[in-house]
Image: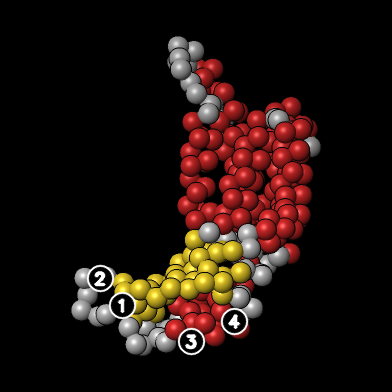
């Protein structure tokens, strides 16, 4: 036991506390993502936070002996390792983003992974209050801001939907029926030729619709796009 006490230093106390705090804070964010069944959950966020904290600790404490034996070294920058963490974590975040038709999922989870990496770095350097406060803000945002987004989306009542199809292959009535099935009344519409380089004749349907439920829009677009004769679907405000 005596050898352990001799080996254990005050720096190890600090390092242990920082690693545990990073695991706790980033794990809390991961629990929220896990509860909502997102692709990156508790373990991923915890590991990212602890790993980032470890890199910061390495940058601060890992080169003490080397610097002590090379006193003539100038320009040592402890921020280099953390800088690579911030940029490199983007590859992990990109893996959580899923694109299906016009539906994009995982952007919030990718952002949360990037933020917990920052929390880990902040804990690693000893800025405990900043880390706890950021975690609190982050969890509250993930839990409640989606409700404010719903209120904002409800205000966007009108949208212009453009559907480009092969001529005579997708009747106008078919697209109209799809819109009406999603309870999106058509305020106006137009039908125009769509010039293109291919030999296939294209037609452009343009609708101004009253959006009653913005959350249903991606599902509607995917359903229209599923028709093999539909060339493109997009919407503008």
Q: Earlier in the sequence, mark 4 or mark 2?
A: 4
Q: Residues within 10 Å of mark 2 (few under 14, many from 20)?
A: few
Distance, label 4 to label 3, CA atoms, is 10 Å
Q: Does any portion of residue 173 appear in the rendered image?
A: yes
Q: Position of residue 135 (x, y in %)?
A: 73, 44
Distance, label 2 to label 3, CA atoms, is 23 Å
Q: Position of residue 186 (x, y in %)?
A: 56, 75
Q: Earlier in the sequence, mark 2 or mark 1?
A: 2
Circle 1 residue: 202
Quarter-of-image position of residue 198: bottom left
- Residue at horizontal 59 percent and vertical 81 percent from the top: 180
Circle 4 residue: 180
Q: Does any portion of residue 98 appear in the rendered image?
A: no
Circle 2 residue: 196
Quarter-of-image position of residue 219: bottom right
Distance, label 2 to label 1, CA atoms, is 7 Å
Compared with residue 143, is residue 7 higher up or lower down, i.e. above or below?
A: above
Q: Position of residue 173 (x, y in %)?
A: 48, 86
Compared with residue 172, is residue 162 higher up or lower down, i.e. above or below?
A: above
- Residue at horizontal 51 percent and vertical 20 percent from the top: 67
Q: Residues within 10 Å of mark 1 (few under 14, many from 20)?
A: many
Circle 3 residue: 174
Quarter-of-image position of residue 39: bottom right
Circles 4 and 2: CB atoms closer than 8 Å: no
Q: Position of residue 153 (x, y in %)?
A: 66, 59
């Amino acid at each position: 036991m005596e050898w352990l006490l001799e080996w254990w230093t005050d720096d190890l106390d600090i390092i242990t506390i920082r690693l545990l705090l990073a695991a706790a804070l980033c794990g809390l964010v991961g629990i929220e993502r896990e509860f909502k069944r997102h692709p990156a959950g508790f373990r991923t966020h915890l590991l990212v936070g602890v790993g980032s904290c470890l890199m910061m600790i390495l940058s601060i404490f890992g080169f003490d002996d080397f610097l002590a034996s090379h006193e003539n070294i100038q320009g040592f920058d402890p921020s280099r390792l953390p800088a690579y963490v911030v940029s490199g974590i983007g590859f992990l975040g990109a893996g959580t983003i899923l694109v299906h038709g016009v539906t994009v999922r995982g952007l919030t989870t990718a952002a949360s992974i990037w933020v917990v990496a920052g929390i880990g770095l902040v804990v690693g350097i000893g800025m405990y209050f900043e880390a706890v406060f950021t975690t609190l803000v982050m969890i509250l945002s993930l839990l409640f801001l989606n409700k404010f987004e719903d209120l904002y989306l409800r205000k966007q009542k009108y949208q212009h939907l453009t559907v480009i199809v092969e001529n005579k292959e997708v009747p106008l009535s078919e697209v109209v029926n799809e819109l009406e099935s999603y309870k999106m009344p058509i305020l106006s519409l137009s039908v125009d030729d769509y010039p293109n380089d291919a030999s296939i004749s294209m037609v452009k349907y343009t609708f101004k619709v009253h959006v009653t439920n913005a959350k249903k829009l991606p599902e509607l677009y995917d359903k229209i796009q599923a028709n093999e004769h539909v060339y493109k679907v997009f919407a503008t405000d």
